[in-house]
Image: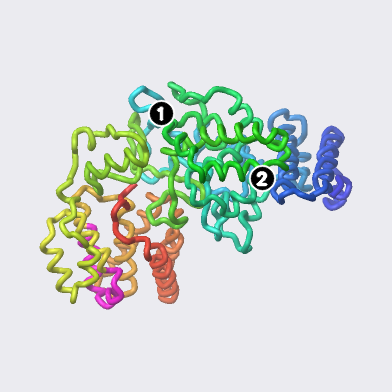
């Protein structure tokens, strides 16, 4: 669409100062027409859309700078440009916020209303700083008290998806069958074979290949021409997955290089390199040079991913801190001067010292030096299995009294008590024992507290189950008990999940209907709550092994 056509659609003359910006906007329109009419033969849809996306971004940045940076146009003219669609109002709104000054796109962003970005590290909150020392390497420290429920980190990760029903890049649901990307992500480039499921079985190799194509070719080309980057021995000045330099902050795992000798990996490299022959950047390299460059870039990425990648088994994980490809970390309460830490998947309340040591060595490649591990502040006797197969005990129990007998036999505080309760409620006949199920979930919470687990995502399910049973009037509870359970559950979701859990809105709706005393609303909401809960925990809540608090 020409500039003149856009002006006619606004139906009012441009304000004073239009002559100053008109030539530049006309140039952007000409570039946009060239991009839209450029021959598409032999190009992927992502390659076709990318120039259009880039020009759209540059034009918005020009208008933004002319008003906010250079102050060369009036407020009236600036708003006229937004109305006429010469600039992206939603994108500019983000640029005006601290920490989002360099954002390139607002599509598919996960909105966290309570998050206040750090001026130096926009993915972190404004209550922390990043430091470095020889023992810990990089660390994050609170500059002031951080109350429980405060969102301390929000960052979009670079992800590889193997679920055909999710977008390969942003992990949102895809309504169109046969497509690897959603509409919002089609402007990004990736070889079709990778995006459409090839090499899924190669794990870290596929993630490394995806990383190579996630950064500008010029940066990757510069990377392979230099010696391997070394991990800086100082605090970083910036840190973001959007910045290739940040990858170099990760400690490499050189042993991964041995796997590149495998025939399967070499064959995959050859296929990908061959497919790049028609690429406007990679295609400029001769085949052998392309092999050398791609292999080196791939190795560097793989070495740094090997112990720093995180596996997501389900987008709706019950104890996760991520929404689609956006990782969200919430404070459990931190004092000023304390280091912010995150569980790597094992905790001293849920796993023995032996389990933690082996897991961290094999999966994350380091030995933990926290007080619990160094001073052996463990409760291993409560975490050791007292039954060979809890699942079998629950499944073959002839009646409810057998379960009660097992529980009486177990040591108070033993994790097997919680495992047995979870195994029991999975039985098909468990729902006929509503009163007993309610008591079992209460016992679950009380037993976990004996190991020091009190305000933790681990307890979310028990409170949700008790809330549902109480408000469905399937158990005898006073109105005070019912209200107390609902409030506790609501606070769990708000403070530990920043209201981003799949059940957050449902519980909020339930509270609203309770306040209005709407029986129909309560009943409908509880039905929906039950469906979502069964979906979240069905099949994937096999045993609470490894599902501890984060």
Circle 1 — which element? strand
Residue 464 in view (yes/no): yes
Mark nearer the N terminus (2 vs 1): 1
**What range is drawn magenta here?**
425-445
Q: Does the magenta stretch include residue 443?
A: yes
Decide if residue 197 is on the left or right side of residue 378.
Answer: right
**Which residue is rendered at x = 22% and y = 41% of the image?**
353
Q: In which quarter of the image is residue 91?
A: top right
Q: In this view, does 225 lie above or below 62?
A: above
Numbered circle sitting on residue 138:
1
Circle 2 — which element? helix
Q: Is residue 147 above or below residue 402?
A: above
Q: In terms of depth relative to the viewer, which is nearer, 400 or 128? A: 400
Give the main secondary structure of the magenta stretch.
helix
Q: Is residue 116 above or below residue 324?
A: above
Horizontal and vertical percent position of residue 358? 28, 41
**Which residue is rendered at x = 64% and y = 52% of the image?**
184
Residue at the limit of the structure toward the left, as seen here: 409
Horizontal and vertical percent position of residue 128? 42, 32
Of the residues tagged 2 and 1, which is closer to the observer? 2
**Which residue is rendered at x = 51% and y = 46% of the image?**
264
Decide if residue 44 is on the left or right side of residue 493.
Answer: right
Q: In terms of depth relative to the viewer, which is nearer, 515 or 463? A: 463
Asked whether disc 2 touches disc 1, contact meaning CB atoms under 8 Å apart, the reply is no
Residue matched to label 2: 275
């Amino acid at each position: 669409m020409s500039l003149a056509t856009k002006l006619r659609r606004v139906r009012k003359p441009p304000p004073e100062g239009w002559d100053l910006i008109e030539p530049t906007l006309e140039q952007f329109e000409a570039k946009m027409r060239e991009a839209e009419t450029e021959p598409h033969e032999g190009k992927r849809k992502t390659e076709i859309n990318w120039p259009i996306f880039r020009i759209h971004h540059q034009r918005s940045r020009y208008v933004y700078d002319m008003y906010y940076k250079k102050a060369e146009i009036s407020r009236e003219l600036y708003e006229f440009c937004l109305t006429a669609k010469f600039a992206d109002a939603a994108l500019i709104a983000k640029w005006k916020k601290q920490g989002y000054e360099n954002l390139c796109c607002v599509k598919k962003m996960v909105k966290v209303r309570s998050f206040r970005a750090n001026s130096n590290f926009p993915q972190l909150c404004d209550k922390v700083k990043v430091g470095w020392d020889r023992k810990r390497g990089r660390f994050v420290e609170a500059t002031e008290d951080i109350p429980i429920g405060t969102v301390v980190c929000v960052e979009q990760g670079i992800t590889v998806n193997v679920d055909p029903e999710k977008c390969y890049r942003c992990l949102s649901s895809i309504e169109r069958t046969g497509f690897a990307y959603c509409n919002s992500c089609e402007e990004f480039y990736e070889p079709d074979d990778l995006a459409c499921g090839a090499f899924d079985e190669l794990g870290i190799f596929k993630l490394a290949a995806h990383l190579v194509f996630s950064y500008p070719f010029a940066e990757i080309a510069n990377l392979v021409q230099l010696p391997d980057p070394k991990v800086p021995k100082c605090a970083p000045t910036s840190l973001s997955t959007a910045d290739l330099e940040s990858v170099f902050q990760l400690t490499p795992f050189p042993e991964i290089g041995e796997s590149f000798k495998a025939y399967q990996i070499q064959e995959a490299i050859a296929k990908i390199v061959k497919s790049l022959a028609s690429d406007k950047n990679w295609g400029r390299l001769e085949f052998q040079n392309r092999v050398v460059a791609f292999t080196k870039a791939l190795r560097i990425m793989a070495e740094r991913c090997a112990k720093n990648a995180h596996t997501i088994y389900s987008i709706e994980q019950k104890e996760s801190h991520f929404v689609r490809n956006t990782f969200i970390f919430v404070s459990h309460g931190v004092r000023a001067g304390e280091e912010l830490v995150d569980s790597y998947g094992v905790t001293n309340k849920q796993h023995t010292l032996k389990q933690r040591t082996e897991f961290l060595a094999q999966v994350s490649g380091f030995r933990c030096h926290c007080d619990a591990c160094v001073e052996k502040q463990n409760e291993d006797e409560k975490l050791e299995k007292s039954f060979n197969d809890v699942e079998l005990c629950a499944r073959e129990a002839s009646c409810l009294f057998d379960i009660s007998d097992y529980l009486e036999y177990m040591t108070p505080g033993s994790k097997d008590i919680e495992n047995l309760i979870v195994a029991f409620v999975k039985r098909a006949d468990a729902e006929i024992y509503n009163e007993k199920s309610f008591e079992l979930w209460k016992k679950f919470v009380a037993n976990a507290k004996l190991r020091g687990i009190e305000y933790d995502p681990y307890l979310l399910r028990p409170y949700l189950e008790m809330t549902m049973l109480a408000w469905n009037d399937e158990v005898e509870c006073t109105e005070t008990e019912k209200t107390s359970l609902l409030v506790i559950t609501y606070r769990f979701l708000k403070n530990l999940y920043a209201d981003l859990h799949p059940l957050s809105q449902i519980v909020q709706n339930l509270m609203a209907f309770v306040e209005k005393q709407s029986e129909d609303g309560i009943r409908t909401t509880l039905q929906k709550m039950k469906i979502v809960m069964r979906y979240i925990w069905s099949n994937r809540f096999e045993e609470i092994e490894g599902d501890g608090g984060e």
